[in-house]
Image (cartoon, coloured by chain):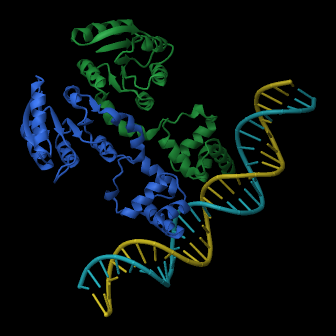
Chain colours: A green, B blue, C cyan, D yellow
DNA sequence: TTTTTCATATGACAAATGTCACTTTTTTAT
DNA sequence: ATAAAAAAGTGACATTTGTCATATGAAAAA
């Protein structure tokens, strides 16, 4: 099995290479230390699996993964990260990564790679059990990609909690009419019809 | 690694045993063919992983898993099923299973077992990529635990898709008034105020 | 300084929504 | 066949919601 390792921390990357290669059937084609490198290295080596860190200086692992997957939908990206950061997990799933495991799960890495190569997905220890809870908190909705300001985001969040206009108004110290206007314009921007659709959109928007 | 196999189809179970044992480090402690047997066998053998089918005569794999996990929170249950039935996937995640893989992914089973034993979770091929969508289509909301009938469920589903009363009515061949009445009673049963809260509830209710 | 933009606000209006008290129809049980 | 229960429907009513045109004050830009 051929893999490419991307990790901010050179030492970690090299150690991983040593350990994984010693397990026998894993061959590390290359090592990189940033998202940019990941994007470059992928098409060159076409690894079976890309083992990548998320938090890195420069382009993050997630961005890199997005780019790689955009060019090759079948790319198998396995994120290997230090702690289970909620936001990242969901995002990773959304972009279509094949897994999200923790560096702590040391002996789990090799079998996880194996599993991913066979086409399955792997989620480390606590990660999977957190999934249901996480997915609910926020779909893969990316406010920034629409032209939606801060106050509008705030209002969307409250609508998505089921608050009425009056409640939102009093919570944000606005008049009810203003809240209505905001929502009206949000609906237009997202081409939705009413607040219920907005809530649905909020929870189900996955690109 | 010690496992117990539960499958409705004796032939499948036995074949699995043969194949898995031939891979070397897997030892099949027992074979069962129903949810009831699973519940009995688990405490007797305390396998590292329980490889279990879902659809079985009598008690389903999911029910059995729920019972087993209730008695031993650390039980590792890996579902092995024929097709990726949406409903089952989410439910499996909700009860805390360690994975959901497809029988088709033949060579994937052994590594998946390995991975699960190391504490990670595995989701077969298309399953993981479907997860975001699925989680949203239905949280772990259990209609039956409330006093909610079939037609009501249907209506809830439609509200949670953002349809108006009129649209729901025409889709279900009911009058708009009837739909209103249904929703009104649903809201009362769930102590919610309006359809938006119902949608929110639908997507976020996870126990 | 003047103009423009932005956030906030109003009031009016139509449509959609939720509630209630009943009625009618259909199904099920006795 | 008759009574009882469940499912579907009606009409009226008060709110809530979404839309629109327009107004105000403050901040930013000219």
Query: Where is A81 relative to A170, above or below?
Result: above
Q: Position of residue B88 (x, y in %)?
A: 29, 45
Position of A36 relative to C5 (above/below):
above
Point out residue A116 in the picture as x, y percentages from the top left corner.
Answer: 30, 24
Is A57 placed above or below B27 here? above
Say above or below: A69 vs C20. Answer: above
Which x, y percent locates residue D27?
76, 30
Q: Is residue A76 left or right of residue B39?
A: right
Can the viewer see residue A16?
Answer: no
Task: Tell me the residue at 52%/44% (across/down).
Answer: A201
Q: Residue at x 38, y 39 (%)?
A: A133
Is B120 placed left or right of A202 in the picture?
Answer: left
> Could you tell whether B19 is left or right of A6 in the image?
left
Asked where in the image residue A96 lies, by quadrant, the reply is top left
Locate residue A97 relative to residue B23 in the image: left or right.
Answer: right
Q: Position of residue B157 (x, y in %)?
A: 44, 55
Quarter of the image for residue A182 reads top right
Kindly identify the residue that appears in the image at 33 percent across and 14 percent down. Answer: A3
Judging depth in this view, the residue of A90 and A69 nearest the camera is: A69
């Amino acid at each position: 099995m051929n893999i490419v390792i991307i990790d901010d921390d050179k030492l970690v990357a090299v150690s991983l290479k040593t350990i994984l290669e010693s397990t026998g059937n894993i061959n590390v084609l290359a090592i990189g230390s940033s998202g940019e490198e990941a994007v470059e290295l992928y098409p060159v080596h076409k690894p079976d699996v890309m083992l990548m860190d998320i938090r890195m200086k420069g382009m993050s692992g997630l961005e890199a993964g997005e780019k790689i997957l955009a060019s090759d939908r079948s790319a198998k990206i396995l994120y290997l990260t230090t702690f289970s950061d909620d936001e990242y997990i969901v995002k990773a799933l959304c972009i279509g990564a094949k897994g999200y495991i923790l560096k702590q799960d040391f002996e789990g890495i090799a079998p996880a790679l194996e599993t991913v190569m066979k086409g399955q997905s792997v989620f480390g220890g606590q990660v999977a059990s957190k999934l249901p809870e996480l997915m609910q908190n926020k779909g893969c909705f990316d406010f920034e990609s629409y032209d939606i300001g801060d106050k509008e985001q705030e209002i969307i969040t409250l609508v998505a909690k089921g608050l009425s206009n009056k409640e939102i108004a009093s919570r944000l110290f606005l008049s009810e009419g203003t809240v209505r206007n905001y929502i009206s314009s949000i609906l237009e921007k997202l081409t939705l019809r009413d607040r219920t659709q907005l809530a649905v959109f909020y929870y189900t928007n996955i690109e």
